[in-house]
Amino acid sequence: MDVSSIKKKIEKLDPKILGLNKIKINSFKKLGMGYSNLNYLADISGKLFNCRINLDQGSSSNLKNEFNNLKLIEKLGISAKPYYLSKNFMLIEYIKGKNFPRNSTKYLSKDVKNFARTVSILHNSNIKKEVANERWINHFKSRINYYLKSMDNLNKETLKKMLKIIEAKVELIKKHPYCLIHFDLSRENIVNTGKEIKLIDLEDLCYSDAGVDLGQLINCFFFKEKDIKVFMQEYKTSDKDLFRRVKIYGEILAFHDFVWSLDAIASIKNGKMSEEKLRYHPLKDRIYVARKKFNQLKKMKVISNNLKFDF
């Protein structure tokens, strides 16, 4: 669906759906692109919305999942308010703020505290969904097995060794309490408004281990010991085993992201990534992320420094 047809559809909506008396599109500006959606900042009668357009026209499940999840946690006040969903796009509240810089390792104490408060609200919400522990673990195992069929001997042997290590770690975190989690707390999915932290991209919201979300502190944010201490003091938990699981999840998620990068690289090389996505996710960026994750796994001492991988 092109932008002009989406704008026409918006103009035909009942204004009450958007909390307005009338609908007039004053501006419609491109914000950026996610892996499966394109975002536009829409000024509609002076009210700002994020118009998220589905890039996978063959399936609208991600868009529908995210909209329904936003409705589910709307009362918590930690994410965007959802307004309207169609097959190809949705309109949600525009959250004005910034993502944490890509390579930042320095954080203000107040931002770390705000981050902890937001995540704590989600984890302690008592909202339940389907259990997702085995789903995501089995998913990345299947992706690895897919690569093993086509990789050269060097990469194949390296990946086999890595998989064996990760499978052993998965066995260490099978027993745990359950709660509602974001499941993808990357830098891109957290907006700092200056006063609070808001969560975006909630299509994977599920019922699992809090350690999955907190493992991202190690995997993605590179929190230092002082940051982790500030975070956990504000987060507050009676789960005495959480710290142990968080470390293991950080290692598993780093491996998960490495495999995800291989997936993107394979899609580009096989000509399966759209031109629109390629403009935002060029091959060199995907290779950079894969190398970074591979080296991160070495620094974490998950894998040996002697392991090699040909990118």
Image (cartoon, rainbow, N blue to C red):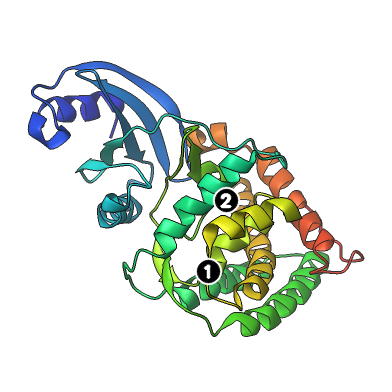
Q: Is residue 229 visible?
A: yes
Q: Secondary structure at mark 2?
A: helix
Q: Position of residue 63 (x, y in %)?
A: 32, 49
Q: Position of residue 241 (x, y in %)?
A: 61, 78
Q: Quadrant of the N terminus?
A: top left
Report the residue at 34% width, 32% height from top: 94
User: How many marks overall?
Assistant: 2
Report the residue at 9% width, 21% height from top: 22
Query: Does residue 30 appear left or right of residue 282 in this picture?
Result: left
Residues at discs 1 and 2 in contact (Cβ within 8 Å): no
Residue type at tag 1: Thr
Query: Does residue 66 appear left or right of residue 193 in this picture?
Result: left
Numbered badge on residue 237:
1
In-front residue for pair 72/288: 72
Along the polypeptide, which appears first: circle 1 or circle 2?
Answer: 1
Query: Does residue 53 appear left or right of residue 17 in this picture?
Result: right
Q: Residue furthest top?
A: 26
Q: Is residue 272 visible?
A: no
Q: Residues within 10 Å of mark 1 (few under 14, many from 20)?
A: few
Q: Residues within 10 Å of mark 2 (few under 14, many from 20)?
A: some
Q: Secondary structure at mark 1?
A: loop
In-front residue for pair 183/263: 183
* Quarter assignment of residue 303: bottom right
Residue beneath disc 2: 267
* Quarter assignment of residue 47: top left
Residue type at tag 2: Ser
**Nearer the camera: disc 1 or disc 2:** 1
Query: Does residue 197 appear left or right of residue 153 in this picture?
Result: left
Report the residue at 77% width, 51% height from top: 291
* Quarter assignment of residue 300: bottom right
